[in-house]
Image (tube, rainbow, N blue to C red):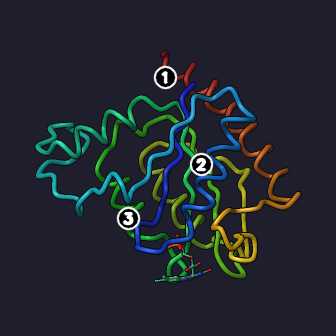
Amino acid sequence: MKLKIITSTTREGRHGIAIEKWITQFAKSNTDFEVELLDLAVINLPFMNEPNHPRMQKYQHEHTKAWSVKINEADAYLIVLAEYNYGFPAPIKNAIDYLFNEWMHKPVAFVSYGGVSGGLRSTQMLKQVVTTLSMMPISAQVNIPFFAKLINEDGIFQANEVIVKSAEHTLAELQKWSMALKNMRGQ
Ligand SMILES: Cc1cc2nc3c(=O)[nH]c(=O)nc-3n(C[C@H](O)[C@H](O)[C@H](O)COP(=O)(O)O)c2cc1C
C-alpha cells in the first residue's frame, strides 16, 4: 500500500515542512505503508494551465504528466494542511485541481495545523472539495493548535502525547480505508 503525504504550503520560510517531515518519519516507523512525501514547493506546479478538463486525461504539460503518475500510484493520501484566512492554502487546491481520475475512490486523511483552530476550518473546507473527486475523507484527524510552540530552535517538530496518539489512530484508520477502497477499485 502506497501512502503519499502532501504538503499544502510552499512559501519561503514556511513552518509546515517541520510537521511534514515529522509525520513522514512517523508513518514510516509506525505503519506498513510505503511512504513518500510529495512537497509542493519542490514539485512546483504552475497555476493550473491544462486546456482540457482533467477527467479527459489529455495532459499537455510534462509537469501534469509527472504529477499524474505520482498521484495515480497512491492507495491513500495524507494532506498536511495549514489554514490561510480561515480556508485552505491555494497551492494544495491547485495541485488537487490538476487531476481527477487519479484521486478517485481513495481515502484521504488530514494533519492540520494553525493557531487556536489548529486548521479545523481549513480541513472542513477541503473535505468538501475532495468529495467532488470521489475521494473518501476519513473522520480521524491530527489537529495541531498553536503548532509553533512545538517546533524547537533547530526547526524540529516535537509531538506531544496527544498528537502521537491521534497520529497512530489516524494512520490506523487510513490503513483500514485504503484496504477497503483498494478492494472496491478492484486492484
Ligand atoms: C496568509 C496567511 C493567512 C493565515 N491565516 C490563518 C488562519 O486563518 N488561521 C490560522 O490558524 N492561522 C493563520 N495563519 C497563520 C498560520 O497558521 C501560520 O503562519 C503557519 O505557519 C502557516 O503555515 P506555513 O508556515 O506552512 O505557511 C495565516 C498565515 C498566513 C501566511
Q: Which residue is mark 3?
A: 91
Tell me the number on the disc at residue 129.
Answer: none
At 82% from the left edge and 52% from the top edge, which residue is drawn? 164
Residue that label 2 marks: 137
Q: Secondary structure at mark 3?
A: helix
Relative to 149, 134 lies left or right: left
Q: Secondary structure at mark 2?
A: strand
> Which residue in the rendered view is the most extreme toward the front?
154
Q: Quadrant of residue 159?
A: bottom right
Q: Amino acid at mark 2?
A: Pro
User: Residue 24 appears at what percent x and percent y?
Assistant: 61, 45
Say which mark, if any, is on residue 185: 1
Q: Quadrant of residue 118?
A: bottom right
Q: Earlier in the sequence, mark 2 or mark 1?
A: 2
Other residues around mark 3 within 10 Å, as few (<14) / some (14–19) / many (≥20): many
Count of numbered tags: 3
Which residue ends up furthest to the top in the rendered image?
187
Which x, y percent locates residue 26?
Answer: 71, 44
The residue closer to the viewer here, 158 or 61, is 158
Which residue is at the far right?
Answer: 161
First reached walking from the N terminus: tag 2 or tag 3 = 3
CB at disc 3 and ligand 1 closer than 8 Å: no
Q: Earlier in the sequence, mark 1 or mark 3?
A: 3
